Image (cartoon, grey):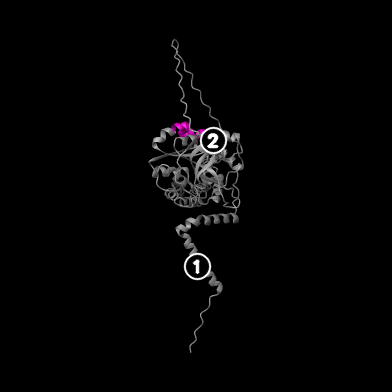
Amino acid sequence: MNSYPKKPSVPPAVTGLLGLLGVLVICYLIYLLPPVNERLGWRVEYAGIYLKGMVNPVPPMATPAVVNTLVIAESTPTPPPTPTVPANTETVVPTATLTPTPTAIPSAMRLDSPAYEKEDLNNCGPAALAMNLKFFGWKGDQFTISDVIKPIRGDRNVNVEELQYYVRNYAGYLKTEYRVGGTIELLKKIVATGIPVMIEEGYTIDKKYWPNDDLWAGHYLLINGYDDAAGTFLTQDVFTGPDVPVKYADLDKRWQSFNRVYILVYPAEKEEELKQVLGSDWDRDTNRQNALETALAETKSDPGNVYAWFNLGSNLVYFDRYDEAATAYDTARKIGFPQRMLRYQFGPFLAYFHTLRSEDLLAVTEYALNRTPNSEEALLWKGWAEYRLGNKAAALENFQKALDARPGYADAEYALEYARVN
């Protein structure tokens, strides 16, 4: 009788390990299914960020070694020249020109609330814009917008300019403008024309993403009503819910962190009325000068207010006054601005780049990337810092990462081409 060797037995530990690996593979494949990923993706992302923060905490942003005193020459209006009257000429006394009195707005106004959109992961800008467009009868939702301007779901920021790009190219029957340095009274006047208005503001999130999280984040809000008796705006909040009342003072405090920017979407026939409401602020340069003066006044009345200094720097950058802007940002860094600030606003990158302060540019971009690793703007400007410091390979790597984070990013494409041949 022939005997055959016994088949070697698999140790139980190996069998268990193979079974566990099989279960993990099946779970991963299920996780990749779009409906599952949409519901669980943010939780997985949150867990990964928090774990990384525990293992490798992000150090505080480096502050500049020396903060110079910022001196800005305040502009004073030049008086008109005194007209000379030729001798033996009859003096004509001009008739006084009456300044028209602006029409008083109602003490309360409530515009129709559009169909509500709850924001998807990192999607508050597209969600708020979708509600704004729906007010004018647009058919679509936040994903209609984000598929165009934010195709990568993990992109954590949508700029005002990107929202405008969508309106101008995909809802061209409507017009759009944005300005900075707004006021509570101006928001009320805009709503009183029958137009809702979007703002970008600071916001307190409901969970920590890392152990020392300061819970501050940027947020878009749609305003479609106000009530002077209650001292509140009626808002559509893509995070909190529809028809949320917000006190005037609370809104202004949160709004200041974004230079009090406001975004207008409106039909063409409303433009002349909006020009009357905005007055001199309709002109972009005048608007920025007004905002600059407001920020400067706030740095004097409240020198410890980090947002006043940051806004001052941003408005100086608009006028290419980079040395002054860098000094304003230095002061903001010394005071300490929120951990996610450079996820949304990039004025310090421009100021330090144009003043040849490459070490400072590297410091702020590295901090920004520790908080938001896929920020295409921080990757781009870190690349320029590395290039200026002679690290061409690192520069090219960061430029490519910026382009990967935002396909079609023209600034990254230019940077790659420039660095490869220079």
Nearer-N-terminus badge (2/1): 1
Q: Are marks 2 and 1 in contact (CB under 8 Å)?
A: no
Q: Residues within 10 Å of mark 1 (few under 14, many from 20)?
A: few
Q: Residue 257: x, y in percent?
A: 55, 41
Q: Please provide the residue range marked out in magenta.
A: 275-290
Identify the disc placed on residue 22. 1
Give me the residue at 53% from left, 56% from top: 43
The number of numbered badges drawn on the structure is: 2
Q: Residue 153: x, y in percent?
A: 47, 52
Give me the residue at 54% from left, 72% from top: 14
Q: What is the secondary structure assignment of the residue under circle 1?
A: helix
- Evaluate whether residue 202 shows in this view: yes
Give the amino acid type for the residue marked by disc 1 in the picture: Gly
246 or 124, which is in the foreground? Answer: 246
361 or 256, which is in the foreground? Answer: 256
Give the amino acid type for the residue marked by disc 2 in the picture: Ala
Q: Is residue 260 magenta?
A: no
**Mark closer to the observer (2, 1):** 2
Q: Residue 101: x, y in percent?
A: 47, 26
Give me the residue at 54% from left, 69% from top: 17
The rendered magenta stretch, by its main secondary structure, is classed as helix
Vertical placement of residue 17 versus 154, above or below: below
Q: Residues within 10 Å of mark 2 (few under 14, many from 20)?
A: few
Q: Is residue 276 magenta?
A: yes
Q: Residue furthest bottom?
A: 1
Q: Residue furthest left?
A: 173
> Which residue is label 2 attached to?
229
Q: Residue furthest top?
A: 88
196 or 321, which is in the foreground? Answer: 196
331 or 107, which is in the foreground? Answer: 107
Identify the disc placed on residue 358. none
| Alpha carbons under labels 2 and 1: distance apart | 64 Å
